[in-house]
Image (cartoon, grey):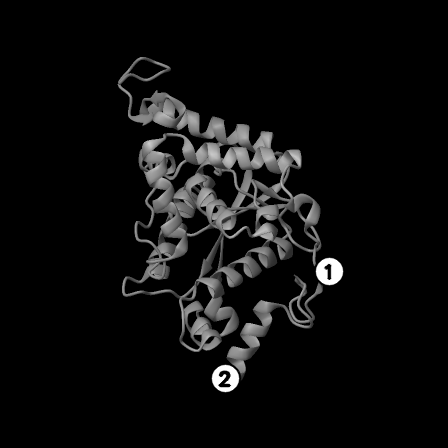
Amino acid sequence: MKCRKCGGKASVNMRQHKLALCKEHYLEWIPEQTERFIKKYHMFARDERILVAVSGGKDSLSLWDILARLGYQADGLYLGLGIDGGIGYSHESQRLSQKFADENNLKLHVVDIEGEYGHSIPVLSEISHRGHGKPCAVCGLAKRHEMNRIARDLGYDVLATGHNLDDEAAVLFGNTLNWSAEYLLRQGPVLPASDGFARKVKPLCRFYEREMTAYALARGIEYIYDECPFAEGSQQIFYKEALNQLESARPGAKLTFYLKFLEARKSGELFVEKNIEHARLHACPNCGQPTSAPGLCSFCRMVEKAKVETE
């Protein structure tokens, strides 16, 4: 198969786009498309400071690499979650994030959850759930809290995450199956800043996971290959596998599913646009972050509970 641009041997064939490219032109195409998505969805401007949430994985490191290549003011944020799983998962992901930052002369903020709050994510989950269930919910809560806190405290204009199309389609699939109207309302390439929450953007939301894997390999980005030890058997992976079967039979199905949703949401065709009432928010008296819960926010309540039960 030949490269669409130069006629040379193609390295990447994207059936959903009916496009094949050689390595050189593929490495040009990905940043070009990213820039197009940034402008199309009005994610951020050239003079704004961007905080990229990095995990040591292919997507977040590739996003940071792309934004740096495009000339944006992008720093990284790594959250140390204290997840081992027998493979030293957090230690290795932090090492690779720092290695990437050092090699590219980029700034990386590192926040260690255990150092900040006295307990790692698995321990906080153990205390919160009495040993039942996986720590995914606790992990998500902690990451949202800390990413927003750091973005706010350090004066960043926008928080960027490396969610790809496979991630977004799987979340959309799950929310649609359960008709989770509030979550459907909030899903999209941009979540505007409001009530103390930083603006959140997903510049990779229209790239397939395999496209980002190809980019990271072509760029020589060293990333952690292992999934989080707690991810096995998750609903998210189940939804991804189901969508992969559909994509195999109908190339482009994931992209069509996601884009049609965005079109319907923008046009006001979804009932959620009219019927969802936003919760009234107030500042958490402990950390100052917005919350709809009475008193302390969910994260601070969890940390306080952990302190009491381990004293």
Query: Where, by quadrant of the figure, is residue 19 drawn?
Result: top left
Q: Identify residue type, mark 1.
A: Arg
Q: Residue at x 65, y 44 (%)?
A: 271
225 up-or-down from 46: above or below: below
Q: In the current view of this chain or complex, which residue is farthest to the bottom?
A: 311
Q: Residues within 10 Å of mark 1 (few under 14, many from 20)?
A: few
- Name the image quarter holding the N terminus: top left
Element class at badge 2: helix
Q: Is residue 119 visible?
A: no
Provide the residue designation for mark 2. Answer: 309
Q: Nearer the viewer, residue 144 or 110?
A: 144
Provide residue 281's location: percent of width, then percent of height: 71, 61
Q: What type is the residue that disc 2 sits on?
A: Glu
Q: Point out residue 169 in the picture as x, y percentages from the top left corner.
A: 46, 42
Dot label at residue 265: none
Say which residue label 1 marks. Answer: 280
Task: Answer left or right for 279 relative to 308.
Answer: right
Residue 62 against residue 294 in the figure, above or below: above
Which numbered mark, 1 or 2, is in the foreground of this view? Answer: 1
Q: Residue furthest top?
A: 7
Q: Above or below — where is 97 with respect to 137?
A: above
- Viewer-proximal residue, 50 or 297? 297
Q: Residues within 10 Å of mark 2 (few under 14, many from 20)?
A: few
Is disc 1 placed on a helix, strand or loop?
loop
